[in-house]
Amino acid sequence: MNREWYKDMAFYQIWPRSFKDGNGDGIGDLWGVYEKLDYIKSLGVGGIWFSPLYVSPNADFGYDISDYYQISPDYGDLEIFDKVLQKAHSLGLKVVMDLVINHTSIEHDWFQKSRRGIEPYTDYYIWREPKADGGKPNNWQGIFESECWQWDDVAGKYYLHLFSSGQPDLNMDNPLVRKEVENIMRFWLSRGVDGFREDVITFISKTEGLPDDGFVIGLRGMRFYESGPRIHEYLQQYRRILEEYPDCFLLGEAPMMTPKKALSFVAGDKRDLDMMFHFQHMEADCFLTEYLRLPFNLKKLKRAFSRWQKRLYNKGWNALYLENHDHPRVISRYGSEQYRVESGKMLACAFLFQQGTPFLYQGQEIGMTNISLPKIEDYADCVAQDVYKRCKRMHLPDKAAMALIRPATRDSSRTPVQWSAGKNGGFSEAEPWFYVNQNYPEINVEAAERDPDSLLHFYRALLNYRKGNDVILKGKYREYEKQSRKLYVYTREYQGKGILVVCSFTEKPVAFQFPKKLKVETMEPLFSNYAAEPAKPEGFTTRPYEVRVYSCRTKG
């Protein structure tokens, strides 16, 4: 039994609605996943993380769950899920489910009974009376919507929803709610899944009394529920479930997390979580959210990378990612659509040689890019819709509002996967539920398979290189060129062996000199996105978005 099997592997995230339509209705489903399991295995990953597959009215596309025990009819049923699970395991692929327990859907049976005062569900959610003056229970702000309190005529009270009004927060202080979570975990673990990714898990404990918040930079009220007073107690309760299923693991998502704070969750034998998704490295071109745009700042990105690598070394374990369902496509953000393949390969090296478990998101391996649609009505994401409403309340013209939304919306990561140059990008014979990016004739899996220099084959080579590599698994991280606004340079060293990674984040030429502090005896080219050249003592001048990775033998 290896409780830390997740360290020497990578995961592939599936956002099921847009992965592959297998039954011809225009919506991605588990039949499509089953069809593509061999492809996923061919990438060199060792596991799949499914975004929510459960029954949902899709106010937030599955992150508003109305039944934790059934598969959404959009995606299939338990029979096809079991078939996918069995085949994945036969291929050596682990399967991890999303566990969304900060909130449910308003259509969940618990909520419907709670609002009607039916015991024992009355206290399953966070209900409050209006203030004496008739105002909202407190002055907190919502994450997805400007308000986080919704009046319910049936209950005659307000309910708290940190996210959309269709996602009421569960009252985790209620032991009956926590028992429900335990039952959900046991149901899926008994079915054979290998663990959970716990959605916004550090928000589940709220400060008693839900006090008003004073002036803050950021979201008002967040300090009263981010890593709240009983968070470790609750996470330990859920962690104990793994003692019944000892070959499984827990990964948590934690907005506003810092590496120092993360250690209280992921360090030690009694840790709450095995890994943690944070957002700091996804803020290199924005402030807190992609909708507050800033120019890309490589130094900010490097600081985030290095802090997490250094603070968690020999204490915790990093979860590495550059794309998922919550962020626009990374080539369109940190790379270059003009130099799509070159910058895609550079970005792959920038994160895959760090210490941790990598997570690839569907379409990332072929370099899918952002979509640009003309009207707000074309976008499906509830966050984009709410931002547009806020813009209109501020009297921003439509052109300015859409200029804000297009590069920031989560919809760019949710376009159907581009499998071929055929109809609808090979995603479906029927009209897809959402727009296929118009660049699918050039950017698709079939084209990438045929091209030996494609980003797809590059990802395969990197992921296979990582497997069983002690330098990647155990090597110490060290950053160079810290003040550079164009280069990201780091090494990993372990027992006399090492690698040097040199990444250029610009199309402009940059003169690079090998660091004098880098004490190596030999250095050989390992990976590059251009024709390989031998290392010269004086260094080299980078080409657009060039990356070079060298294997090294270090002195002493």
Image (spheres, rainbow, N blue to C red):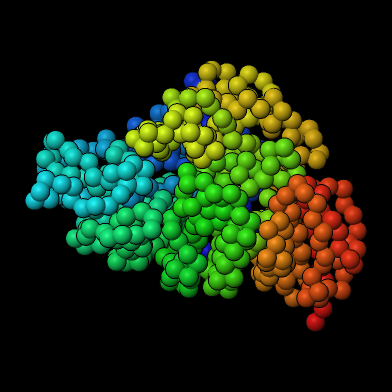
Above or below residue 260? Residue 150 is above
Quadrant housing the C terminus? bottom right
Q: Is residue 475 left or right of residue 523?
A: left
In the image, is residue 456 above or below residue 286?
above
Does 334 appear above or below 26? below
413 shown above or below 48 = above
Q: Residue at x 70, y 52 (%)?
A: 505
Outermost residue to the left: 132
The quadrant in which residue 416 appears is top right
Q: Can the viewer see residue 244? A: no
Q: Quadrant of residue 146?
A: top left
> Residue at image x 23%, y 45%?
149
Front-lying residue, 155 or 133:
133
For residue 362, side relative to residue 158 (left or right):
right
- Residue 448 percent location from the top left of the image: 74, 34
The answer to which of 450 and 513 lies nearer the viewer is 513
**In the displayed structure image, the side of residue 495 where residue 177 appears, left or right:** left
- Coordinates of residue 489 in the picture (x, y in percent): 72, 62
Q: Can residue 214 be seen from the camera position used here?
A: yes
Q: Residue at x 58, y 26 (%)?
A: 436
User: From the viewer's perspective, is 79 left or right of 368?
Assistant: left
Residue lying at 40% horizontally and 52% vertically, measured from the top left: 200
**Image quarter (top left, top right, bottom left or bottom right) of the N terminus:** bottom right
Residue 394 screen position, x and y as percent = 36, 37
Q: Position of residue 253 (x, y in %)?
A: 45, 54
Q: Nearer the viewer, residue 285 or 62?
A: 285
Which residue reaches farthest bottom? 556
